[in-house]
């Protein structure tokens, strides 16, 4: 049995456009609690607080020095870590592609996930939106309103914003921008009622998506006998029932997804323990690591200005392998995205099967 300690940072639920928290991240450690206690004592022994919190440590030079020393040591054994993050505004756009464009294309015989077409489209649109920040914010807000509260008026509001760039509004020229955004416009215009019924805030959650990918990555390394420790006050604790459905040992053996974007089931978490973070050094060290991830990613995507401390963090963070991430890339072909591999089981069909099986118990 292997213990995994996990913590999260930047969670705002379904509010993917929160201006104060534009990045969500997870970090986890494959270390025993005794090993974590030793690391805590070695690098944070002079910290007066009984519980380590990255946000508090980062405020003062003394705490920053402790974090940098700890990070340098942890990087030497990064095979015992897993980190992942979401650029939330980009995540909002990918959700619109997943739940609006993809069903529209599927009904016309096109699998948008094949060859990473969903990622290509998301990357191209987001790249275009970078040169139109005011329009980008209005479009993402309109899509968020529709996804959160699907009604004819929110759908029309999103179409009105899209029409400004698609050539559907009066006196608008067509061109590369129009071609890209027409995918969204026409998917909304001709949305099937059944597809519209799946829209809702529940589909904007990203925490469990990252968590199951992360634990699946651990399972490939460690095998099917893991005990996961997470803070009892975390938002993941509030989704415990849904989490248990995904990690249940009763889930059939399956490879789910496409090319490199695959998950292996069952995930191998035999038990998830939501415990007080004050009592567990492992969770506290995961808190420190995830705080570093969020700070670095905010600077990477220009959500905040860098400083000397963050520059030092980047020196350690560079080259740290990611288990998964959702963020814009300047990659616009399957070859660049490494999404030209084989197709496996459809993730949505597999998910529906899991929850149907759980509901029939």
Image: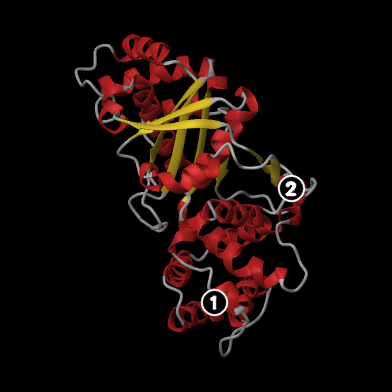
Residues 354 and 60: in front is 354
Q: Label 2: which residue?
A: 339
- Dot 1 falls on a residue whose secondary structure is helix
Residue at point 30%, 28% (across, down): 277
In this rendering, does residue 301 appear at all?
A: no
Q: Residue 162 shows which numbered tag?
A: 1
Q: In the drawing, does residue 327 fall left or right of residue 73?
A: right
Establish if 332 lies above or below 245.
Answer: below
Quadrant in which residue 122 is drawn: bottom right
- Residue at the spot 71% in from the left edge and 53% down from the top edge: 116
Q: Which mark is residue 306?
A: none
Which residue lies at the image location 45% right of the left edge and 60% below the top edge? 202
Q: Is residue 280 above or below residue 25?
A: above
Give percent across and percent down for residue 33: 40, 16
Q: Position of residue 219 (x, y in %)?
A: 60, 29
**Image quadrant assignment for residue 58:** top left
- Rounded to the nearest whole Å, what is the CA distance between mark 2 and mark 1? 28 Å
Would residue 8 appear left or right of 258 to someone viewing this image? left
- The extreme front residue here reads 361
Pointer 2: residues within 10 angstroms few (<14), some, or many (20+)? many
* Whether residue 282 is situated above or below residue 337 in the rendered picture: above
Residue 340, percent across and down?
A: 79, 48
Which class describes the residues within 10 Å of circle 1: few (<14), some (14-19), or many (20+)? many
The number of numbered discs placed on residues in the rendered structure image is: 2
């Amino acid at each position: 049995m292997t213990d995994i300690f996990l913590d999260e940072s930047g969670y705002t639920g379904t509010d993917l456009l929160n201006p104060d928290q534009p990045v969500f991240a997870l970090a986890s450690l494959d270390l025993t609690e005794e090993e974590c206690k030793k690391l805590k004592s070695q690098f944070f022994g002079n910290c007066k607080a009984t519980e380590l919190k990255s946000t508090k440590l980062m405020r003062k030079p003394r705490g920053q020095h402790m974090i940098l020393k700890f990070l340098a040591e942890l990087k030497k054994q990064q095979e015992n870590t897993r980190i992942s993050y979401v650029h939330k505004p980009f995540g909002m756009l990918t959700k619109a592609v997943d739940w609006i464009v993809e069903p529209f294309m599927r009904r016309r015989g096109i699998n948008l996930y094949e060859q990473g077409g969903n990622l290509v489209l998301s990357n191209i649109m987001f790249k275009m939106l970078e040169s139109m920040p005011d329009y980008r914010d209005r479009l993402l807000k309109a899509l968020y309103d529709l996804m959160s509260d699907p009604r004819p008026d929110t759908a029309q509001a999103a179409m009105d914003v899209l029409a400004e760039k698609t050539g559907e509004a009066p006196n608008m020229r067509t061109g590369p921008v129009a071609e890209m955004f027409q995918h969204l416009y026409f998917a909304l215009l001709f949305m099937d009622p059944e597809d519209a019924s799946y829209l809702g805030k529940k589909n904007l959650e990203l925490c469990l998506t990252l968590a199951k990918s992360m634990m699946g990555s651990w399972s490939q390394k460690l095998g099917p006998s893991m005990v996961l420790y997470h803070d009892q006050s975390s938002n993941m604790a509030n989704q415990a029932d849904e989490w248990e459905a995904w990690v249940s040992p009763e889930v059939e053996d399956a490879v789910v997804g496409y090319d490199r974007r695959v998950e292996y089931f069952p995930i191998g978490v035999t038990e998830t323990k939501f415990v007080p973070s004050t009592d567990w050094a492992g969770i506290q060290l995961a808190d420190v690591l995830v705080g570093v991830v969020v700070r670095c990613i905010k600077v990477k995507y220009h959500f905040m200005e860098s400083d000397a401390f963050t520059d030092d963090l980047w020196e350690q963070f560079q080259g740290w392998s990611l288990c998964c991430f959702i963020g814009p890339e300047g990659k616009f072909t399957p070859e660049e995205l490494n999404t030209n591999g084989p197709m496996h089981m459809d993730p949505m069909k597999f998910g529906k099967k899991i929850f149907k099986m759980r509901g029939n118990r």
